[in-house]
Amino acid sequence: MRILFVTQHFPPERGAVRRLYQFAEFFKENGHDVTILTAMPNYPDGIVPEEYRGKFYHREVRNGLDIHRSYVLPASNTQPKKRMLGFLTFLCTTLINSFRIKGKFDVILASSPPVTSAVIGYILSKIRRSKFVLEIRDLQPEMGEQYGSLKKSLFTRMIRRVMDFLYKRAWKVVSVTEGLTDWMRDKGIPDNRLCTIKSGVGSDFIDSHSNGIRKKYGWEDKYLILFCGTMGAVRTLEPIIESARLLADNKQYHFVFVGDGQKKDTYEALVKQYNLTNISFVGLQPLQQIPYFLHAGDLLVDCLKDVPFAQSVLPVKMYEYMAAGKPIAFGSAAKEATRFLDQAGGLLSFPAHNPDKLADLIKRLYNREIDGIELGRKYHAYVREHHSTTKWGKRYLDLLSEVDK
C-alpha cells in the first residue's frame, strides 16, 4: 500500500507522537510506502530546531520515511491561544505543500488532535480519491472543555460539528482505548467502522536499562519516586508534591519530575514555597534518555485530573512505565487505566485529593510490605507479551489492508 500519515506532531517532538512514528516505521519495514505530512517541530517548548527555522517547506527522509514538513506558528504548551493559531497555520500551509507530493495514496490516515489534522486528511482524501481513516487519540473539543484548556463557546461547538461530520465520513475510526471506542459507539457510529488500536511500546523501552542515571544525578542511595511526562492541564501533580512534603524528614525518599509543561513553573514555585529539598526537576530530556530515567526510578507515579472523560483515558506513558518493570502508583479513578493496571499484575492507586495515601504507599513499598519488585516484573512481562508495538502494528496493517480492498 501507499499510505499517507497526516499529523501535526511528529518526532523529533516528544510525547504520544512516538506512537505514530513507531507504526510508520513498522509499516515501512513490512514493505509499504509511507509518507508523512507534518509540521516543523516545535512542541512542547515552542522552539524550532535550527535546521527547520525560517522554512515554509522542508523534506527529509528518516529511517526510510518520506517526511514533508510545513511551516507552523511555533508555540509552547504554556501558550494555548498561540497554539490555536498554530493549528490554523498548519491547516493552510500543509494543504498548500501537499501539492508537492505526487501520485495517489491507497489510504490517508489522519491523527487527531489537533482537529485540523483530521480536516486536512479528509480534504486530501477527496482530492486524491483515497480511503480516509481517522485516528482519535483524544476527544476534542470535549476533553479540552473538561480539562479546562478550552472554554465552551461558539468555537468549540463548531469544532464538535466538524468532528461529528468527519466521524461519519471516515472509512474507519480508530481509537486508542476501548473507552473511546465505546464513546464513538454511543454516538451512533456502527461497529463495522470502529476499531481499537492501542499504542503499545517499542523494544527501546522494553529492553532498556538505567545507563548510569542514578550516579549521574547523585541518587545512588535514594528511593526514587519518579514522574515523567508533560505537566499540563490533564494532570494534577500537586498530590505528589504534597506527599513529598509529608515525607520530607525521611531522607531516603527523593522525588523526580522529568519533563516540562504549562504547569511546571507552578509546581516549582510550590516546591520553593515549601522549601523542599527532596524534589528535583530535571526538565525536558532527549527521547532516547527517557527509558533510562524510568529504569532508574523505584516507583513511577502519575495523577490525572478527575473529569468524566478521564474514565476513557489510558496514558501512553503507562506502557512505557510498565516496560521499565517498576511498580506504578496511579492517582486517578479512571476506569480504563485502573482496569489495565489491575489486569497487568495489580493496582496501586491513591485518590488524587489524598497525598497521605500516596505517602503511605511509598513507605509500604520501601519497607517491602508491598512487593514492588514482583509487581514490576508482572508489568514488564504483561506489556512485552500483549502490548508491543509490533503486535499492535500488525493489527493496524490488517485494518488498513481491509480498508484498501
Image (cartoon, helix red, strand yellow):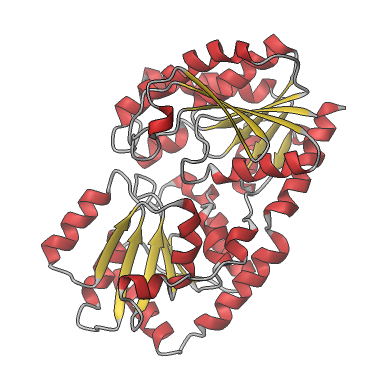
Q: Is residue 291 above or below residue 244?
A: above
| Residue sitting at x 45%, y 89% | 368
Q: Quadrant of the N terminus?
A: top right
Which residue is at 46% across, 46% downward?
A: 308
- Residue 292 percent across, percent down from the top left: 47, 65
- Left/right of residue 386 with respect to residue 116 in the rendered view: right
Above or below for 202 versus 74 = below
Is 137 or 49 nearer to us in this picture? 49
Along the viewing direction, whichever of 390 and 352 lies nearer the viewer: 390
Q: Quadrant of residue 335?
A: bottom right
Quarter of the image where one finds residue 353: bottom left
Pick out the residue farthest to the front.
51
- Quadrant placement of the C terminus: top right
399 or 187, which lies in front? 399
Q: Quadrant of residue 67?
A: top right
Residue at (52% x, 36% y) in the render: 10
Which percent across, then down, holds residue 150? 35, 31
Q: How many tags in the picture?
A: 0
Q: Is residue 263 left or right of residue 206?
A: left
| Rendered location of residue 329, percent (x, y) | 44, 69
Whole-percent x and y of residue 248?
21, 77
Furthest residue to the right?
405
